[in-house]
Amino acid sequence: MADNPPPPPAGSNPNTTTTSSNVLEATNSLSQATIGGGAPSVVPPSPPTPSADASTPSVDPYSAEGPPPQMIRRIMYLQSLHDTEKKSIVEKYTAERAVLEAKYAKLYNSVYDKRLKVLVGDCDKEIDEEFLKQDPTAEIDEEEEKKMPVKGCPQFWVTALSQCEAISEILTEADVDALEYLSDIRSVDLPNGAGFTLTFFFAENPFFENTTLSKTYSIPNLYMDDEPMLEKITGTAIKWKPDKCLTHKTTTKKQRSKSGKNKGQIRTVTKSVKVDSFFNFFADVNVPSDDDTVNSEEADLIEGIIDQDYDIACSFRSNVIPDAIEWFTGEANGDDEDEDDEGWEEGDSDDDDDVFDEDDSEDDDEDNDDAPKQSKARKEAAAKRGGSGAAGKGGAPPPP
C-alpha cells in the first residue's frame, strides 16, 4: 500500500496560487532579524519545477503564506553577498582600470602630441629630410612648392569630421570656415572613470574669443559594460565676436499698432533665432533626474536629444580622436572606389546587355533620388582641399 503524501505545513493552503509578493512581504517581515542588521529584500526568480519523484517533502515558497524563515535568511544572505563582496570587487576593478587607462592615455597622448606638431607645420622640414633619406632617388621641387606654400595639413580636422556620419549630420556650410581653425581634439577621462571631457583647441580666429571649447560627461559607470548612467552634460559658453555667431541669427520684423494710443505707429522687433550648427554641440544638455516629472512625449524628445548628443561624443572619443588620419583619408568609414564592384564578376560581352528600356531608365533615376548624398559641408571641405571627395583614396588634394 502506497504511503500517503505528507501533509502541508500547518496553516498552509495547498490550493493557493503562487505570488512573488508573498516572498517580498515575508522577507520584509524578517529583514531586521538576521545578517548584518538586515539587507534589502528581493523577489527571487521562479524556482524550477520539482521532480515528480522527489524523495523529500518540499514546501512551496510561493504560497500565500510566503517562504519559510530559513529560506528568507538565505535570500538575505545572497543580497548581502551582492551588496558587500561583489560591489567591493567592482570598486577595485574600477580603480585598477582607471590607473591602467591613465597609464596608456599618457602613451597615446605622446602620439597625439606628435600628430599636432605635424598638423600645425612644426615638422615640415624634418619630414622632408626623412622623406629624402628613405628614398635617395626622390626629389623635392622647392621652387615649385614655394609657388603654393602649404604649412602643415590645413583642413585636416574638418575633413576628418565630415567623413564621420554621426558628426557630419550636424555640420553646415557655415561651420566649415570656423572649423578651419580647429587644431586639435583631445578626450580625458575623469578621475576613477567617472566620465570624460572632450576639449577642442582653436587657433586665433575671426569667429569667437575662446581658444578651447569643452564638453564634460559625468558617467559613474563609464568603465562598466552596463548602459551608461548619464548624470550631467556640461558644455561651454561660446564668446562670439560681433556678427559672427553661427548658432543664432538675428531677425527683424516691423509691426504696426492697430489700436490704442500708438495706433498707426510702426515699431521694429528684433529676435534671435536658433539655427543648425555644429557649434550647438557645446551647449549644456539637460539630463532629467529621477525626481523630474515629464510626460511620455517629452520623455521621448529628451531621450532622442541625449542619445544623439552622446553618440556624437562617443564618435569623437572612440573613433575620430584615436584614428583621425584614417577618418581624414576615408579608410575608417570604408570609403573605397572598388566597394561598389565587390561581389560582382565580369561576364561575357553580350550585345543584348546594351539594350535598355526607357521606362527602366526612369525607374533608375527615381531610385537614385533616394541614394545618400554628400553633405554640403563635406563638399565645401572637399572643394577647399582641391578635391571632389574624401581625401586620400581618390580625393586627396593634388600635389603641389
Image: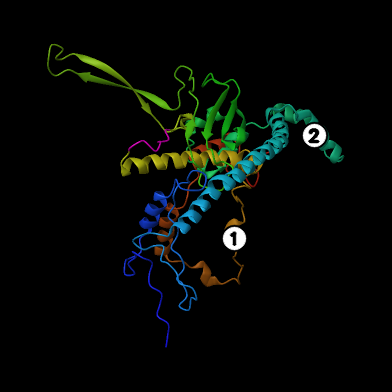
Crowdedness near tag 1: few (<14), some (14–19) or many (≥20) residues, C-alpha within 10 Å: few
Residue at point 46%, 16% (across, down)? 242
Q: Nearer the viewer, residue 386 or 254?
A: 254
Q: Is residue 223 visible?
A: yes
Alpha carbon distance from label 2 to label 1: 37 Å
Residue at point 30%, 41% (across, down)? 295
344 inside magenta stretch = no
Q: Nearer the viewer, residue 181 or 382?
A: 181
Q: Quadrant of residue 10?
A: bottom left
Residue 3 location (% of width, % of height): 42, 82
291 inside magenta stretch = yes
The residue that label 1 is drawn on is 341
Residue 389 location (% of width, % of height): 58, 43
Residue type at tag 2: Ile
In screen coordinates, is 212 left or right of 151?
left
Residue 51 location (% of width, % of height): 47, 75
Q: Residue 140, which numbered label?
A: 2
Residue 390 location (% of width, % of height): 60, 43
Q: Residue 327, which numbered label?
A: none
In screen coordinates, is 104 left or right of 29?
right
Residue at point 46%, 68% (across, down)? 48
Q: Is residue 362 above or below residue 209?
A: below
Find numbered disc 1 in the image and state the secondary structure of the residue it sits on: helix
Q: Quadrant of residue 276?
A: top left
Quarter placement of the N terminus = bottom left
Q: Is residue 110 above or below residue 225?
A: above
Q: What are the residue bounds of the magenta stretch?
A: 286-293
